[in-house]
Structures are given as structure tokens and as C-alpha cells.
Image (cartoon, grey):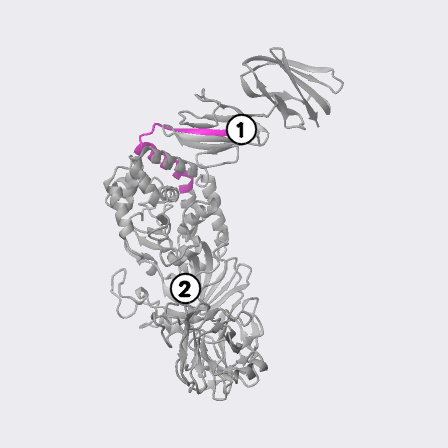
Amino acid sequence: MLRSVQLLSAALLAQAAFCQVVVNEACSKNLDLITDAFGATPDWVELHNTGTEAVDLTGYHLSDEPTQPWKWALPSIMLEPGAHLVVFHGNDNSDGLHFPFNLDRDGEPLALSSVAQGVIDVVYLPFLKPNHSTGRGPTGSLVIFDQPTPGAANNSTGYPGYAQAPAFSIAPGFHNGPTSVAISSCSECMVHLSWDGSEPDTSSALYSGPITMEQTGVVKAIAYQPGHLPSTVTAGTYLINASTRLPVVSISVHPDSLFDDTLGLYELGPEAEPDYPHWGANFWDERGIDVRFEYFDEAGVERIDQDVELRIHGGRVSRNQPQRPLRLTARDRLGKDRIEHAFFREKPQAAAFKRLVLRNSGSDWCQAHYRDGFWHQVALHAGLDIDVLGFKPSVVYLNGAYWGILNIRERVDVDYLALNHGVDPEPILLMDEEDYIIQGDSLHFDSLQWFIRGHDMSDDAHFGIVDSLIDLTSYSDYFALEIFAGNSDWPSNNLKFWKPSVHEGKWRYLMYDLDATLSAAPWIPVDFDMFYWLHVHREGFIHAEIYQSLIQRPEFRRGFLNRLADLMNTCLTPASLLEENERIRNTMEGEIPRHFARWATDVANWDLHSGQLLPAWMRERGDRVREHVLEWYDLPNTAHLRFDVFPPEAGTLLVNTLRPSLPFDGIYFNGNDIDVSVTAAPGFRLSHWSYSAGALEQPKSEHLRRSFATDGTLTAHFTKEGTTLYALPNPATTRCDLSYEAPTAGSAEVALFDPQGRLLKEWVVQVSAGVGKIPVDLSPFAAGVLQVSVTQDGMRATTRILRL
């Protein structure tokens, strides 16, 4: 249907004819037509006094909902005959000229009302291209202007609307074999096409009949209609015989914008220095180019089709790879200021991105091709308290040409923080490893770092100040993971930290760029000592010095080493790491041969890194890190502990920071006290603790704090409230255990009876004071209800067992 402008109803049109003040012109996408008093370029509305007398605007209101006409009161000023008044969208109405609601670019009503007359003028804002407006033409009817005149008479050419945008008969996406596509528009429209990624115009090929897509490519179409403005451009990527398990990103743009020898953003260009990293090259230019971005999910469904800005992304290594990383930015001037899709399964709440990065894996390019993403997935799946980035490998096409695998990632900036933490982006303080100010100022952090450098963290008051300013829970997770990963390109590089505002929140670190891990190079072996890196090699770097200061405090060191141990016993075990690695390998492996062939690299390199080097590192790294901890913090040894409860399901354990499934096995540091506490299930209470390798000083306390010198099992024994004897499991098959709470240590008589009360078996056991278990062999006895008793010191307890 032709996009045209219209009044809401003939009645309102008739009423507007008797009003002196009318909505004369409006723009819902102002790029540079006019600025407001604050230098911004917001949406605007122009009012015009068409009468011969001045009008007092007191009591006049503007609204984008005619049923709620009093949204915003106009300023109490006199509008002279023939005069124009431009008002703007904005939250700061200190000048009285800023209304609080946005104008919808896709169209919405706009109502002018007065207290005396009610709704006096309603116009319908149609879809408008950027820097276009709708307004009253010479006859008073609404038209679209491609040369708006805010604050002046509407004397430029007006158009009834835009030509109807072309439509494709076959939807873009995946197709098996050559595909015929017909293109339709209005009967008067002339449709022009391009196939090279450029925006079509009147000089482009004229559509004359269905086109056949025989290979993967991008089609763009635009319609022209006499007396109308050109349509929007319809674009579609047809993926012919291009099956993949990965999502697909299609980028289309005029080829010269990327690949022209002189101006192409992807190229060296004429100003590049001859030596690495080729400063001055076009790919170091921070300028952006406008491109079409399409995204097809794993099921082949097109989820995104919008214009965005593209820039080359990354540092020296990344930009100098043949396959360069790309940054996509949603711009309001291009139609949408967000890319709206939940790309990352682990982050369903993140569904509207200002920026996305198509990352080439930096120094890991065409090796494993996912080292950095691996660590972010580990952190996300374990629920670690770290600001990490989503990760999704994707297949990329540039102007229909296969471009291999780039990983979709979030961009580390204030918009990322606003999206992931729900905070206002404006007051955020964001800095990098060299204290470079990305946003805000450095005064707050500078004072903090000098305080830490100049004060003893063993002093509770000093530490309390630091604790109030740094999120030490997140800090511990972040440093533990970076240390375990053996990130040699950190903390003097690849480090950002942030705070919600000067007056609110605590400093947190952002994790990114862990390409130099997992045996990425011979000089980063599995036994790479990160504690030496932090204590010695990076001496003088402020974030290493902060760690050095904090770790001198015994209680912080105890907690940090326990958190490191907790993680090495859960998400950083060889089994967990290998499982995560295999999951990513399975996701990518079907596309890997084609990717490596595209970039003329040996696919065996991927098998070497992802299938051999990474798994070998994962199997051994935990043992090496534990050795480093013992050496640097003067601890004697580790102990392999099993944590359990009896009876099962009678309660849970909190082991340091973990509430694990039981039984739970972990390796902890002797000389570094761990914390273990119990929570009884309803109907149970703690009886006592037992440790298979020795006695405990406080066996009945609900909380234990101690270290363990030898391997052993630590068990919390529970008893039912008001019950001293019961069987589990119950019903049972060939065996069960009796949970018996003995009043004293000594011998006890156990007797088993059939349903008629006849004695089947009798034996004597030795029991310890408190709750313990007595195994019972049921295999000799027939199915039915059995009665069992335990007698000790003349006191008898009984229960029943259902033998299946």
C-alpha cells in the first residue's frame, strides 16, 4: 500500500479549519535540520498561527495520544499572527520548549488541544525517512517534505508519500538449488536492482521479470513512482546450497567502501606504514560506513534486517589478520538505535544491543578460533560473578561472498554495562588498564589506588574502606579465573574496570580477550605461573599492586584461595573444562573445513589446537595451579576431601561458597581453613560430624572452620526429630541401612522379625554415641513387612521395613 499522510478523520479536518493555531510540520528523525537550545538534534514539531490575531498559548497542550490530550503543556507565550513556533522532544524542559514523548518514526497521531476548546487539531505522522518531515502543503493537506523548513513557511515541494517498497516473492534465506524470485511494487512503479551490495538508484538495472539466484548473493531493490519520493530499499540474502549448523550474518555495502585500494576500509590504503602493525592503514581508520545487516538464526529464520554502521574493530593483532574483525553499531539516523534480538542463550535478558562485534579470535585466529569465547562460556555456565561477554560463532557473508567464521560478541562499553546491569549509562565511570578514561573521570579511582598503596590492608578499618569501594566478591571470581586461565596478556593489558557512578556502586572488572591462554603459544605452557606474573613480573602495574596489597590480609587470602579451590573443584575441573570444550567443538566443527579453506590455512591446525593442545592443558592445569599456590603462600600440602550427609537428603552443606550436590569431592589447601556449615531438611536435626581421618574438635557445631592435612570424608549426621531409629531406603530390596541415634558408645543388639513376630536374625554391633548407620542384609528374607529393633543398655527402639 502507498504510504501517504492523512488526518485522522474528516470531522477533525473540518474542526482544524476553524483553528488559528495548527500543527504545521513535524519531523520524527532529525539528523541535522535544526538544533535545540542545548545543541541536540531531537524530534520536532512546528506550530503555526494561521490567523490575523495573536494567540496566547496558555492552556494549549501537545500529545501523541489523542485520548490523553494533556501530556504536555505548551509555554505561556503569545504566538503572533503568521508566526511559527518549533518545540522539541527532550527530558530537559527548562526552556519550556521540550515535550517528553518521542515521535514514532513508523507513524503515530499528534494532537493539539486547548483547555477551552478540547482537541482542536490531530494530524497523523506517517513513516518518515531521516531528515524528512510531514506538513501542510499549499492546500492545507498533509504532504511529505524531503527539504523541511522548521520555523518557516512550508514552501518546498511536497509529496503525497513514498513509492511502495518492492516485495520479494520468495523470502530471503536458505534455499536448495537455484531460486526464482519475482519482485512486485505498485503498477506505476519502476523497480531498480543491484547485486553487488550497493544501494540501487535510477542508474541501476531495471527490473523486467523474475530473477534466478543460482548462487549465494544479495539482491537490493528500490521503487520509483511519478510524483512520489523513492521507496525504502528492500534487501535480501539468498543462501543457495549453503547449509550450516551455525547462524549466518550477511553484510552488504558498496564494494568500494570496503575493498577500494585507496578508500576501502578493509585495505592497507596509501598511507599505511610498511612495517607491522601498519599504522596509518585504512583498517586503522575509526570512520564508519553504512551497511545492511541481516541475521539468520540456527533454524534459518531471518531475525534481523536493518541498516547499521560498520567499523573495523580490535587491536594490532586482530586488525592485521586477513579476516578482520567488524563492529556493528545501531544508529538512530539509520532507522533503529538498537539491534533487537537475544543472540546469546545464556543471556536471555540481553535483547537490545547498541553494538555487536564480529570477532576473529585475535591471536587465536585459525587456531582453535574460540579460546577467548571458551572462558566466557565457562563463566556464564557456572554463574560466576564476572562481567563477561556473550559468545556465538557465526558464518559471515560479505556482499554474498563466503567470509568464514566470526564470533558474535558483545562490545565492552557503557551501553553493554547499561544493558547487563540495568544502570543509567550517563554517569558510568569506565577506565582501562592504563587508567585511560573511557568515560567519566579518574579522580575516584586515583584516590582509591593511592589509598591502597599507602595503607596496610591488615588493618580492619583500612580494608573496610576498600571493601566499600571494590566489589570483592566479583573481584575474587575475576582474578581466580584469569589466574587459572594463565592469561599472559593481563593485567597490564586487556583490562577494563567500571563503577555505576561517582556516588553509587562499587568498582568491578570486565573480562575480555583471553586469546593468550590454553597453550596458545610455546611461551605460555600449562605450568605458566600467574602468581609470579602478579607478584614479580607485573610489579609496578597498579592492578597487580592492588592484588599484592589485598592478598597480604590473612582473611582475604583465606577467602580468595578457598574461592579459587572451589572453582577448581567445580567448573574448572578437567571434566568440566573438557565437556565445555567438546560442546564448542561440536558446534563449530561442521563449518571448520570450509572456514580454513577460505583463508588458505591448514585445517589440521584446528585439530591440533582444539583437539589436542587444549584438552591436554585442561587435564593438567589444576594440578599446576595448586602447586603454585602451595609455593607462593607457604602451605604444606593439599587434601582430597569428600563431603557428605547421612542420611541422604537429610540436609545440605555449604562448603565455602558452594552448596554442592552430595557426595561432593574437592581438593583443598592444608593450612588454609575452609568453612563448612549444615542446613537440616524439615524434620531433621544435626546430630554430629564425623571425619574418617581423625577426630573433630567441635563435632556437634553446625559450622566448622578448619583445614585438613590428610585425605578423608567429612560427614554430617542427622537424626529425625523425635526419632532414634529408622530405615533407608524404605521400601528396600536386598539391603538397607538403619539410622540409629545411640545414647552412648558401646554394643547394641539388632533383631529382625517376620510379619508374625517370629525372630529371623539377631546380631550385635558396636556403635558410637550419636547418629550412625547399621547395615542390614535383607537378601535371605521373603518380601513383606519386617520389624527391626535395636536394644542398648535396656532401651529398645523399633521400626518397620518394607522388603520388596
The amino acid marked with disc number 2 is: Leu
- Quarter of the image where one finds residue 437: bottom left
Residue 75's place in the image compared with 711, above or below, is below
The amino acid marked with disc number 1 is: Val
Residue 434 seen by the camera: no
Q: Which of these two is toward me, 449 or 315?
A: 449
Kindly identify which residue carries mark 1.
Answer: 645
Query: In the image, residue 27 lies at what x, y percent?
Result: 44, 76
Front position among marks 1 and 2? 1
715 sits left or right of 452 in the view: right
Q: Which residues are magenta?
A: 617-643
Judged from this view, the residue extending furthest toward the top is 794
Give whichever of discs 1 and 2 has the lower sequence position. Answer: 2
- Quadrant that contains the C terminus: top right
Kindly identify which residue carries mark 2.
Answer: 328
Please tell me whether residue 391 belongs to the stretch shown in magenta.
no
Question: In what element is the residue under mark 2?
Answer: strand
Q: Are marks 1 and 2 in contact (CB under 8 Å)?
A: no
Q: Judge the density around disc 1: few (<14), some (14-19), many (≥20) Cα neighbours within 10 Å.
A: many
